[in-house]
Image: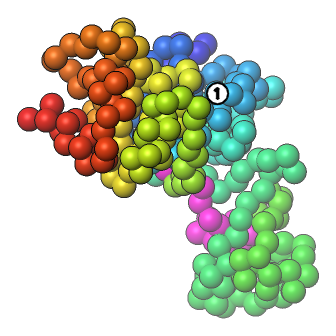
Amino acid sequence: MKQSLLEQASILLLRKGFTIKSLTRTCFDILARKEDKILLVKILEDADSISKEYTGEMNRISSYVNGSPLIIAEKAGDKLQDNIIYTRFNIYTLNFNTFKNCIEYKFPFVKRDHAGLKAHVAGNKLKEVREREGISLNEIARSVGVSKSMVQRYESGESEVTVGKALKLHRLLGPSVFDKINIFDYSKELIHGGKSDVSKKYSELGFDALETKNVPFDIVAKKGKELIFTEIGDKTRSELNSLSKLVDADSLVIFKEKKPKDIPAVTKKEFMEFEKARELIKFLKEFEK
């Protein structure tokens, strides 16, 4: 089931103009990019099977690459319904049909959290449509089954509504009165820190740096627009270069002693000797020429 879902998602993304990189034994299965849109996608049969460690790693890495983490699954205990956005550890979770609609910019407005199915009313839009259609506050209140003051709260943007009330509003005023859930709209504060000498050195050079697990690099570092995927050890992983190119990152391999000359690589001693971030960046850019 997972393999079939992986193939469907990959084919869809390719058809819609995304460049993709498939991975194995990592916290995400697909890295996809189209222009400024970057997705980190995990494919599962059951979304409940994902660990907090994996979702945490997806969230942290997404914040560095300006991407959106997603889980595509058939179920989360129960079957996932079409056009509903679920969450697992703060990651949007959806079935393939909903994912397909989102890739085509047909975003849903219903989400499910621990409190059940809800939608968020776009207050200004609700007021605009209501006044354009000549519908009073009282008419909406009667149709939805709430008080006039509650409708006024909807228009001020202060309230979410249950799916039952959302459907009544939808029938009366249409889908434009709800805030759509844009899966590409993701932002998270960078989390930095690490115990290794390399992480600390990145911090000294003015980078935010994160030690990683379950991905083909050991540290991701960012300073302004400069992004670096760093691998530490004497064996390089083949995915590193293609992943870094896909998200406009530089790649760096730090060897213990000897190093090859045909890739961006330094020994640990050489890395620790960099005094300015610009020196490191200049070194990496030399390999792009």
Quadrant position of residue 47: top right
- In this view of the protein, can residue 106 be seen by the observer? no
Residue 275, compared with residue 229, is above or below; it is: below
Residue depicted at x 77% and y 76%: 158
In the visual, does 101 lie left or right of 76? left
- Left or right relative to 287: residue 238: right
Residue 198 shown left or right of residue 278 in the figure? right
Nearer to the camera, 192 or 29: 192
Residue 104: % across, % down: 44, 46
Residue beneath label 1, please? 54
Residue extent of the magenta highlight: 167-184
**Residue at x-position 23% and y-position 43%:** 279
Q: Residue 217: horizontal and vertical position, in percent?
A: 44, 24
Crowdedness of circle 1 by 10 Å Cα count: few (<14), some, many (20+)?
some
Residue name at image x 30 percent, y 38 percent: 274
The answer to if 75 sits in the magenta stretch is: no
